[in-house]
């Protein structure tokens, strides 16, 4: 079924250098080999792209999260998209398990860019006819694209994981007010309670948690967010729930960015487990500290449905 030519030709999956293991997992889940695409560097550091397989008239999915090194991976994506467009692919879908440059989705002060809008513009200009994203940092980024965006959530992945944990009277905690919507969705699916850590941010990279709204004493707590970046918000929230007497504390986030002081913070965090997905390759320093869940089957199922013009 997977190899049958659909409306946009045969299904093909290829990738740059951002996360080859995830791309291989996705290709395996949809039942096709990875299309051969060489992405290297010229001696001066410029990116060189060469397709080894024919893509003419086919339905091509490019798996390329724009994680660190962000600018390198973004430029690889743009050049691959341009290569596919000039090689006459019938439809080109940018599969972005992690969308970088998402923080600046509005002008929150004077004389700053709207970086997310600029990135969506260049992705479209390079040749993307469609975008598949997982857990965007801000859902409104979908509206910055003029092409169709399929926005997936990682809830099925995490729910399956935590259902095996024998949770006692679970409560899902939003580490800040912005995470209430995500926490509420997980609380419903895990039949748990809801709590919020009231946080005051003292600088763009430093957060000071103030107090807890909700009851966590003698209960299993899951602190849920879309990403762990510098880990300041999550580890401070973990400290608060521990001080309020929770039984166990789990940190869970779709994207393990682990930037800045993240490694230092999570290594000292008093938590029972840190869980992320494989949208971003984990730095070596954190591999023994985190439990990684596969997003390949979820993304692969979405790719098959897009290819076969089914509901996503």
Image (cartoon, rainbow, N blue to C red):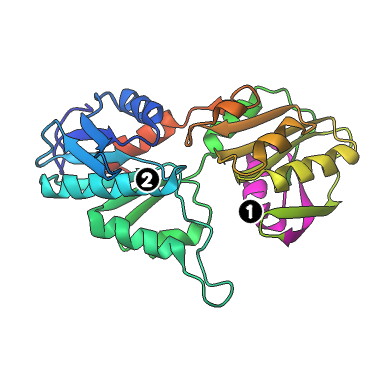
Task: Say which residue appears at 71% left-offset and 46% top-offset.
Answer: 232
Q: Give the quarter of the image for residue 199.
A: bottom right
Q: Name the foreground residue: 142 vs 184.
A: 142
Q: Give the quarter of the image for residue 109.
A: bottom right
Q: Which mark is residue 164?
A: none
Categorize mark 2 by other alpha carbons within 10 Å: few (<14), some (14-19), many (20+): some
Any magenta on residue 196?
yes
Image: magenta residue range: 174-202
Residue depth check, mark 2 versus mark 1: number of the one nearer the observer: 2
Q: Position of residue 120 (x, y in %)?
A: 36, 59
Q: Which mark is residue 72?
A: 2
Q: Secondary structure at mark 1?
A: helix
Q: Position of residue 121 (x, y in %)?
A: 33, 63
Q: Name the foreground residue: 237 vs 219.
A: 237
Distance in Å between CA atoms under marks 2 and 1: 33 Å
Q: Choose the circle earlier in sequence order: 2 or 1.
A: 2
Dot 2 and dot 1 residues touching (CB under 8 Å): no
The residue under label 1 is: 181
Q: Position of residue 98 (x, y in %)?
A: 46, 44
């Amino acid at each position: 079924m997977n190899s049958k030519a659909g409306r946009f030709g045969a299904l093909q999956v290829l990738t740059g250098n951002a996360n080859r293991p995830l791309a291989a997992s996705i290709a395996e889940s949809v039942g096709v080999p990875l299309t051969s695409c060489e992405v290297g560097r010229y001696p001066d550091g410029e990116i060189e792209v060469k397709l080894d397989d024919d893509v003419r008239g086919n339905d091509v999915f490019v798996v390329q999260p724009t994680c660190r090194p962000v600018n390198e991976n973004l430029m690889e994506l743009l050049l691959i998209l341009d290569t596919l467009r000039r090689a006459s692919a019938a439809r080109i879908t940018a599969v972005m398990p992690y969308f970088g440059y998402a923080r600046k989705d509005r002008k929150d002060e004077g004389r700053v860019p709207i970086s997310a809008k600029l990135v969506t513009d260049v992705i479209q200009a390079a040749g993307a006819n469609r975008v598949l994203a997982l857990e965007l940092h801000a859902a409104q980024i979908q509206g910055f694209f003029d092409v169709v965006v399929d926005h997936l959530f990682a809830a099925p992945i995490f729910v399956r994981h935590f259902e095996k944990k024998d949770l006692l009277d679970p409560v899902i905690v939003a580490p800040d007010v912005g995470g209430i919507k995500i926490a509420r969705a997980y609380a419903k699916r895990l039949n748990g309670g809801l709590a919020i850590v009231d946080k005051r941010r003292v600088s763009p990279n430093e957060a000071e948690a103030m107090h807890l709204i909700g009851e966590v004493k003698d209960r299993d707590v899951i602190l849920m967010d879309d990403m762990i970046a510098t880990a300041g918000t999550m580890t401070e929230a973990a400290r608060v729930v521990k001080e309020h007497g929770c039984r166990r504390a789990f940190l869970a986030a779709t994207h393990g960015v682990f930037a800045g002081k993240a490694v230092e913070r999570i290594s000292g965090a008093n938590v029972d487990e840190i869980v992320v997905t494989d949208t971003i390759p984990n730095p070596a320093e954190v591999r023994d500290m985190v439990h990684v869940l596969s997003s390949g089957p979820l993304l692969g199922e979405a790719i098959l449905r897009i290819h076969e013009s089914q509901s996503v």
